Amino acid sequence: MQHIALSWLVYRLTGSVFLLGLIGFTSQIPMFILSPFTGVITDRFDRFKIMKTAQILFMLQALLITLLVLFDIIEVWQIIALSIFFGVISAFDAPARQSLVIDLIDNPNDLGNAIALNSAIFNGARLIGPAIAGITIAIVGEGICFLINTFSYIAVIIALSYIKTEKKQTKTDQSKFLKSFTEGFKYTFKSLPIKTLIILLAILSLVGLPYIILLPAYAKEILHGGSDTLGYLMSSMGAGALIAALYMASRKSVIGLGKIISTNIILLGLGIILASFSKQLYLSSIVFFLTGLSMIFTLSSINTLLQTITEDNKRGRVMSFYSMALMGIYPLGNLLAGSIASGIGIPYTLFIMGFITILSGIWLIFHRTTIK
């Protein structure tokens, strides 16, 4: 809900596609800069405490933006500052959260199912949240969406307090921090399967996934709709993502994930291209259902493969590079997409993004043996 409300708020205040991209950039560029270092921290300290602290800080960030919007004193520079703050917290939260999954299951063979179930819950929320947000914005404005999000963190923090994990990490000498970072970097990029997956994810984050940041402008300028239209598009994407996540949760092994990744990257590219030609809500909803489906098939498969082949004592550092490639490169893609769209228009931008995404899928087909 906050994601939809923030995007709509920025576009309502400015009418600028470029600023949509800029906000996406500022909220996630800290991930690109900090993730390699926060990954070291994740491997050296209690992941669970890191994650709980991050949730408290997320709640404070949500509360600040709620108050600014409800008192009608919000300005673009404040949104940018709070987006940077959000990005810094995320840089600590994401590696800890990704690495924590394996600590919550008894059998490592269930890792892929656990990751997929996590995606199913997340995308179930993304199916419902945007539709509620679109209607809420239309009736009472963006501020109530931010308020609901603020209160939601109370439930998150209470839920986390009930989770008990066996402590698997020990603190190490701080003087070895640089050595630990270098060790994680070498391990990640000397392993051909890990390196291939990280590079592929970075390409997708740069040219494939940033189509999402253009959706507020797409809903208004291409489909001539309002916040409810944006909510329907995001819900369609969430529905596809949920189905993909439920399928991935039912899989019993990692065999065949390489084929799933390459096939669905191509489908994602085709979906983005089709969206560039659509001017009807029903057709766009079908297309974004397809992009949501293929996106989660791809991301969940990459996540599962990475965590399966990574050594336990290096998982935090490898997943920090995963987070950097997924959420750190993504803001650069947002900025690029917003800049290009402001120059040549949304349809042409989507077409170019989809075409490059298809090429990356074809590239993987010829390199798939490295990740089987």
Image (cartoon, grey):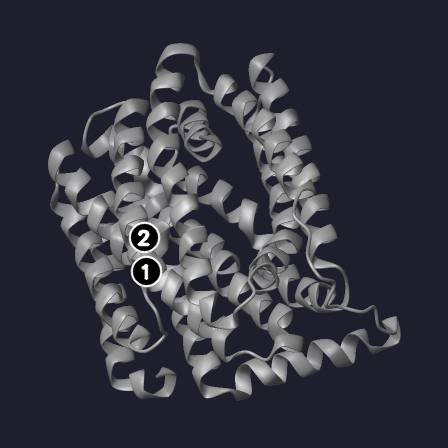
Asked whether residue 340 appears in the rendered view, the answer is no
The residue singled out by tag 2 in the image is 246
When the figure is inspected, residue 5 is found, relative to residue 307, above or below; the finding is: above
- Name the foreground residue: 134 vs 103: 103
The residues bearing labels 2 and 1 have C-alpha atoms spaced at a distance of 7 Å
Q: Quadrant of the C terminus?
A: bottom left
The residue singled out by tag 1 in the image is 250
- Asked if the residue at tag 1 contacts the one at tag 2, i.e. Cβ–Cβ closer than 8 Å, the answer is yes
Q: Which residue is drawn at 42% across and 39% down?
A: 20
Q: Which residue is drawn at 54% across and 50% down?
A: 28
Amino acid type, residue under disc 2 in the picture: Leu
Question: Badge 2: how crowded within 10 Å, few (<14), some, or many (20+)?
Answer: many
Question: Badge 1: how crowded within 10 Å, few (<14), some, or many (20+)?
Answer: few
**SS class of the residue under badge 1?**
helix
Amino acid type, residue under disc 1 in the picture: Ser
Q: In which quarter of the image is residue 365?
A: bottom left
Q: In which quarter of the image is residue 229?
A: top left
Q: In which quarter of the image is the N terminus?
A: top left
Q: Which residue is drawn at 31% across and 37% down?
A: 234
Across the whole image, how many numbered discs are drawn on residues? 2
- The residue lying furthest to the front in this view is 106
Q: Where is residue 138 in the image (x, y as percent from the top left)?
A: 35, 15
When the figure is inspected, residue 76 is found, relative to residue 83, above or below; the finding is: above
Q: Quadrant of residue 155?
A: top right
Nearest to the eye among marks 2 and 1: give it.
1
Q: Where is residue 193 in the image (x, y as percent from the top left)?
A: 43, 83
